[in-house]
Image (spheres, rainbow, N blue to C red):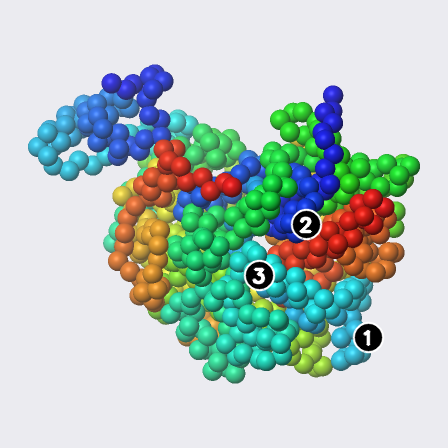
Amino acid sequence: MTIDLKKTDVVIVGLGAVGGVAALPLARAGIEVVGLEAGSWLTPRDFAPDELRNNFRGWPQAAQKANSEIPTHRPNASAPYSPRLPIHPMMNAVGGTSLHYWAQSWRLNPWDFKVVSETTRRYGVSRVPKGSTVEDWPFGLEEIEPYYDKVEHEVGVSGQAGNIGGAIDPRGNIFEGPRKRGYPMPPLRGTEFTDRMAGAARKLGWHAFPGPAAINSTTYDERPSCQYHGFCNRGGCHVSAKNSTAVSTIPKAMETKRLQVVTQAVATSVTYDDRGGRVTGVVYVRGGQEYFQPAEVVLLASYTYENVRLLLLSKSKAFPSGLSNNAGQVGRHYFSHHTGNPVTALFPFDLNNWYGLPAQGVAVDNWADDNFDHSALDFIGGGNLWVYSDRRPIAAANMSTFGKAPSWGGAWKSFIKTNADRFNVAYLQKTTLPYEDNYLDLDPVAKDPMGFPVIRITADHKDNEKRMGAFIQDKMAQWFMAGGAIAVEKGPTGTMGPSTHAYGGTRMGDNRETNVVNRFGFSHEVPNLGIVGASVMGTSGAHNPTLTAQALAWRTTEHLAANWNAIAKG
Amino acid sequence: MASPTDDNAPRDVSRRALFKQVGAASAAAIAGAPLASEAAMAQERAAQGQPVAAPQLEALESLTATEADTLEAIVARLIPSDENGPGAKEARAAHYIDRALTGPLRSSREAYAAGLAAIDVYAQSTKGTAFARLGTADQDAVLTDMEKNVATGFFPNAAAFFNLVRAHAVQGTFCDPYYGGNANFVGWDLISYPGLRMTVGEDEQRMKAPKAVRQSAYDEAMFTMKGGTHDHRP
């Protein structure tokens, strides 16, 4: 028997990086919110500096809901399936993956919003890759800038501004679009190694700067600054200096008494009323019992895969192929960030990368987005070059031997004894476009323990991404060599299996034939259904998605609060 | 006195703490395994106020005795003891694997049963005796055949089992010692890891690593079962 609960104004599915932000403008506007979260509350005690547990055993997500619904992957519709990942890249908890992510909190570049029109203007329409379904966003950077600003201040982001109101500050990213004001905190400190690499970039004539992070560089919101202890990568923060939504926006929303957090709640469908033409609430399972949470407005704030899955699983007479999917766009325009083609460098001296965190690094954006002339190149877009301080013992012992030693035995042992602290792996995020034949749907075979099909990813890198990957790899190798490396190793392009940077599937745009949600994040087909998260993003840029997804969520919910009667009461 | 069947016995207490609490001989008796002479010597040292190393309380939790001997011999060749210092044997990597096979690595238990049996069959047929009894050159030859995937009798193949054991041997040599490997921090010493510091200053991130500190994450009380209240829930 399903238990019917008292109706609320808004039910949010998922209280992670994005749902945890979405709740705050609503609660502050006097709107009653129920937040359904599949995970639990975690506390600083849960975040031990333990490489084996965090990085090899995948704690805490190993025992969680996400891990029972790991998407399957195949490169294309006629290719065999890839081996299934043993651990889901994302986790369930209040705060979600913002608890253990790298916390790099970048704004997108102005070009990322206008890939089609700017490429056409500068190089001609033929340079938009064949088969890509990329569209301009329905607005430019200037529309989302106030929301970037709000999130940077409410969540807490450290960084160095590079462009305040058009005034370029060379200490920051000179390629960023204009911002109203600087970051609320100065950037995380550099290390001697990242300073050395910054100097090497300048010698090449490139612009080096510290990246932005949702990590305290000073005391902020009564929480301490980063301790740089080295276990931030897939580990939570033991002093709450990482600004997950669990310690920032969710507690602020709870202070209003208008956010009710329901943990261990596994949403299974969104209900739709054929007569009213509106969604009526969310069905979820908690402790083996099924509940129905009625609401005036439903906001999906799960990760990309789960947003899409919930829509496809929520079938009704009016939506036989899934909620809000009568135009057949749910699951389309899917892509995951191209972070393949890694570059690993070997240095002839110790780097002391043992401490720090992935967000403590130095960036070069000269080869990102459209910051350089592509006239004579065979691709569009580019990559962010990122060098950082992060190393733990097991990973260090597993380092590449650069063809200089076998993989075991005395000679191997001798090699790692000398070199375990002499290598560095750059993080290279690159523009990735959506394509006609890259998509998400329901797997016809694999199911979760409740019997619901999991998401199937059908996606592979295309020529534009491969060419860009090789180009960026060369730039990174050049930078490492300028920094004193004696060898570099270039890794493969990689596949497009389950990713921490998964975009699209419920894309945002004005054209209802090619997009699931409108420019404010509400369904074109169901007026009181909102969707937030990177699943609404149509381009990736060359930087991490979280801040953009959070800014869009703030914008969606602020729009909802300002237009409550029109959206909620229809 | 606490005993294994006593419901009030502290279950999460570290061996070191247990040792301090009840003394060497009693701790040994609780674990029930070590040689009487070791226990007696430890008790004598403790009575004289000398530092006493934690006893090697190492029941086989998953592997059979024969499997353990074979595995011990394999990891000792993968990461040997040599002029560069102790290796996987001293780190107790096989002990780490044995414990983990009852829990986080349990999905690999069948692979170990089959693989450790297969390596003995292969060693017998190519070198005339069980792997653990071979000389180191012959052991290395067998492991090389596995790595190159030319050794027969393995399912799905020899290289898969080789890679599995290698990955786990590295974990057991370089993991937090809480998990039963990296004994006496020999793995961390090998690669000059400066150790766990809960707060790292700017000077400690200069390109010369600071002086090594040696502790487990779980020497920090806040991360143990008895960590007290650090609940930041609103």
Tell me where residue A101 appears, x and y as whole percent. Answer: 54, 52
Sequence order check, earlier mark of 2 and 3: 2
Q: Chain of mark 2?
A: A
Q: Residue at x 70, y 68 (%)?
A: A141
When the figure is inspected, residue B54 is found, relative to residue A483, above or below; the finding is above
| Mark 3 Cα shell of 10 Å, populated few (<14), some (14-19), many (≥20) | many
Tell me if label 2 and label 1 are in contact, CB under 8 Å: no
Disc on res. A418: none
Residue A75 in sight in this render: no
| Mark 1 Cα shell of 10 Å, populated few (<14), some (14-19), many (≥20) | few
Q: CA distance from mark 3 to mark 1?
A: 36 Å
Give the secondary structure at mark 1: helix
Instruction: Report the amino acid beneath label 3.
Output: Glu
Instruction: Report the amino acid beneath label 1.
Output: Val
Is A69 displayed left or right of A50 in the figure?
Answer: right
Disc on res. A125: 1
